[in-house]
Amino acid sequence: MHVLVTGGAGFIGGHLCRHLLNDDHVVHAVDNFDPYYDREIKEEGIADLTGRPNFHFYEQDINNTAFLGSVLEGRSLDAIVHLAAKAGVRASIDNPVGCAHANITGTQSMLEFARQMEVGTFILGSSSSVYGNNEKVPFAEEDAVHHPISPYAASKRSGELLAHTYHHLYDMTVYCLRFFTVYGPRQRPDLAIHKFARQLLTSQPITMYGDGTSSRDYTYVDDIVGGIVESFHRASALDQPEYEIINLGGSETTELLDLIHGIGDAFGIEPTIEQQSMPPGDVKRTYADISKAKALLDYTPNTSIEEGLNKFASWAKDYYSERTVEV
Ligand code: NAD
């Protein structure tokens, strides 16, 4: 298969590109190294890929489809996995226009590019944030998602709606995969697990927002990559194009206080905690109903939070052993 991965230097994108290359696919990756976080961690994440003959990397904004059209002219793409985004909830409150440009206009640009290139399968990295503070758990795909509580969440829902339009108009198969808090080696530095790790490594108290009872459905990155890959398999076996929204979660929730102690265990450091109020835009809990993913994609997350935290800690100890740790 020939696949275009947007956000290919990002956390999930880098893991996906490596997996696809190891499976002998041809991977084109585009990323503009958005300055939201340090590019060094992204460069390190794809350093082992850049010399591989089936890996083609373009440093460019996804909205520059003229550039993409020129470098991919004459190529046939089987699928686009659209992961490029400004991914932070809190950052989207500070910069809603930038968020909309990357996440909404950027998705529109990539859908239009997919149409022009006659790409049959479009996989969108959506998010559990679209469920907002819905009371009913676990969150299921048919639940109402009318009340996003951050520009980021609204932008992700917008992407799902735009993608539906392209499915309807142009017979594109679209999977909107709603990822639930993804973690693992090279995780985004702004996300809780990574931030807590840096606080532990610098002997600072861990900042705990709220009373520690907020909870998340943490999903190890390899399980997310597995779900994306299964989406290709499903798409390639279809007679008719389809549009599906599918939760990809770990389907197990962890309260924040337990997560903090779990990270402490993984690093072998007893955490101290500094409590602060919950920031606006943060949801109280996430919890995925993954029965649809099981039925359609044979998806089974099989990395426990303890195992995943140990793998993350092992990477982080190594990564920060050669660098100054900044919180
Ligand atoms: P990430 O920030 O590590 O990766 C996103 C990449 O997109 C970055 O490398 C960034 O440079 C690139 N990018 C941003 N704007 C761009 C643009 N205009 N043109 C080209 N590249 C651009 O984030 P991630 O955690 O790997 O997330 C990947 C996707 O998954 C995102 O769409 C995100 O919304 C979604 N998602 C992530 C999580 C999670 O917990 N990590 C949860 C739900 C959804």
Image (cartoon, rainbow, N blue to C red):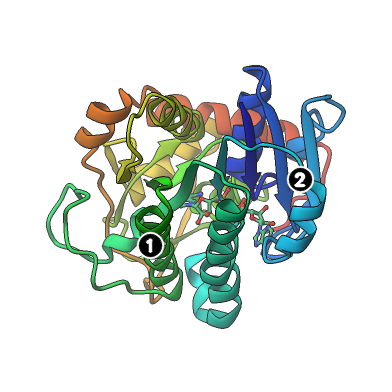
Percent x, y of residue 197 = 58, 45
Q: Residue furthest top?
A: 23
Kind of residue sitting beneath label 2:
Leu
Percent x, y of residue 250 = 33, 35
Q: Where 59 falls versus 155 (above or below)?
A: above
Residue 84: image quadrant is bottom right
Ligand 1 is found in the corner quadrant, namely bottom right
Please tell me how many numbered marks the rendered image carries: 2
Q: Is residue 268 visible?
A: no
Identified at 28% across, 52% down, the residue is 286
Q: Which mark is residue 72?
A: 2
Q: Residue furthest left?
A: 136
Element marked by disc 2: loop
Return the residue at label 1: 165
Question: Where is the N terminus found, in terms of image quarters?
Answer: top right
Q: CA distance from mark 1 to mark 2?
A: 24 Å
Kind of residue sitting beneath label 1:
Thr
Q: Where 15 falls versus 208 (above or below)?
A: above
